[in-house]
């Protein structure tokens, strides 16, 4: 189980509490109680507890709109988990969970703010959440597996709308199964249908050409993926702000032109025998008197050459 499943359960419970017009504190209490029951149902293993904690922090940061508070909660959770289980300090799974949560807290709302307001917020979140998580997890993933998942973001965006029904409906079916078997069976069937859609998206994107090209290994691969992540965020910002991007490009062009105009006019001449191939800047006026006439090529004005001893 990942933090995304816990986030979906917690988000669904928060929406249900809001639809019942509960206050913020009672609604949060109901959501946390439901998340606790979900953890007990799945099994309170270390990975489940870690995922539930990270998912709760991510949803709280997105819902509250306070990245600073969510970041503080994340730091406290990481410290507490490392104190309880120090072996997590060398676990790549724990590192990826922390990085994904950190990306959602720090970048999630910013990326959602870049997307125009006419786009529905659920669609903006479906793009912003996996993108912000993948940007921070990418450099670590290429260290574990030196290849680039070309269509991973596309697959996550397409599957995001299908994962939610699978998690929510499947959990609801398990909860009502003892008291209402037939409705629970229907919910399980619907959840299975959406789960088949997730599997189909995974198979389709994995079969596309160039789905997993090789990536450099080691520190160089980590640094290049970090640079690629920064370029990806910059490209998303430019795509979301085309007018500002054009203004910035024109301003950069005008600044470059002004800088080139201020440079002194110079030309380069060939290096002399003692210059050892170096280029020197020289003035356009080489010092020759330009008023002297150039030698004429007219043969009629040439004087005959007299040889010694000749007549």
Image (cartoon, rainbow, N blue to C red):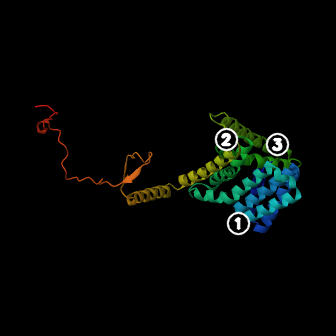
Crowding at mark 3 (Cα within 10 Å: few <14, some 14-19, many 20+): some
Give percent across and percent down for residue 178.
Answer: 89, 48
Query: x%, y% of residue 306?
Result: 14, 35
**Relative to the observer, which residue lies in front, 129 or 30?**
129
Question: Which of the pair 303/131 is nearer the observer?
Answer: 303
Name the residue at 80% across, 53% down.
Answer: 51
Going from N to C along the chain, the mark reached first, 3 or 2, is: 3
* Residue 199 visible in the shown view: yes
Please name the residue that numbered disc 3 is placed on.
185
Q: Give the label on residue 216, or none.
A: 2
The residue drawn where x is 62% and y is 48% is 228
Of tags 3 and 1, which is closer to the observer?
Answer: 1
Crowding at label 2, few (<14), some or many (≥20) Cα neighbours within 10 Å? some
* Badge 3 element: helix
Give the quarter of the image for residue 200: top right
Q: Earlier in the sequence, mark 1 or mark 2?
A: 1
Secondary structure of the residue carrying tag 2 is loop
Q: CA distance from mark 1 to mark 2?
A: 35 Å
Asked if one can make out residue 15 in the rendered structure from this viewpoint, the answer is: no
**Residue linked to disc 1:** 68
């Amino acid at each position: 189980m990942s933090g995304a499943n816990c986030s979906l359960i917690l988000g669904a419970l928060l929406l249900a509490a809001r639809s019942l017009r509960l206050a913020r504190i009672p609604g949060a209490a109901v959501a946390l109680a439901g998340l606790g029951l979900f953890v007990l149902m799945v099994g309170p293993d270390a990975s489940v507890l870690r995922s539930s904690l990270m998912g709760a922090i991510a949803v709280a940061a997105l819902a509250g709109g306070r990245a600073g508070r969510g970041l503080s909660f994340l730091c406290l959770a990481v410290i507490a988990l490392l104190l309880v289980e120090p072996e997590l300090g060398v676990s790549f799974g724990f590192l990826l969970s922390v990085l994904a949560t950190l990306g959602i807290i720090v970048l999630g709302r910013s990326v959602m703010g870049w997307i125009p307001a006419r786009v529905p917020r659920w669609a903006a979140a479906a793009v912003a959440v996996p993108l912000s998580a993948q940007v921070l997890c990418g450099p670590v993933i290429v260290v574990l597996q030196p290849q680039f998942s070309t269509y991973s973001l596309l697959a996550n965006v397409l599957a995001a709308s299908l994962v939610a029904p699978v998690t929510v409906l499947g959990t609801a079916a398990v909860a009502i199964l003892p008291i209402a078997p037939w409705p629970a069976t229907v919910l399980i069937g619907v959840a299975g249908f959406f789960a088949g859609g997730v599997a189909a998206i995974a198979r389709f994107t994995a079969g596309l050409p160039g789905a997993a090209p090789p990536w450099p290994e080691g520190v160089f691969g980590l640094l290049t993926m970090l640079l690629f992540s920064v370029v990806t965020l910059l490209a998303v910002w430019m795509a979301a702000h085309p007018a500002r991007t054009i203004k910035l490009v024109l301003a950069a062009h005008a600044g470059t032109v002004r800088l080139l105009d201020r440079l002194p006019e110079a030309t380069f001449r060939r290096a002399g025998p003692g210059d050892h191939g170096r280029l020197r800047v020289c003035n356009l006026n080489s010092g020759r008197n330009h008023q002297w006439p150039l030698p004429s090529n007219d043969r009629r004005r040439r004087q005959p050459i007299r040889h010694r001893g000749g007549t």
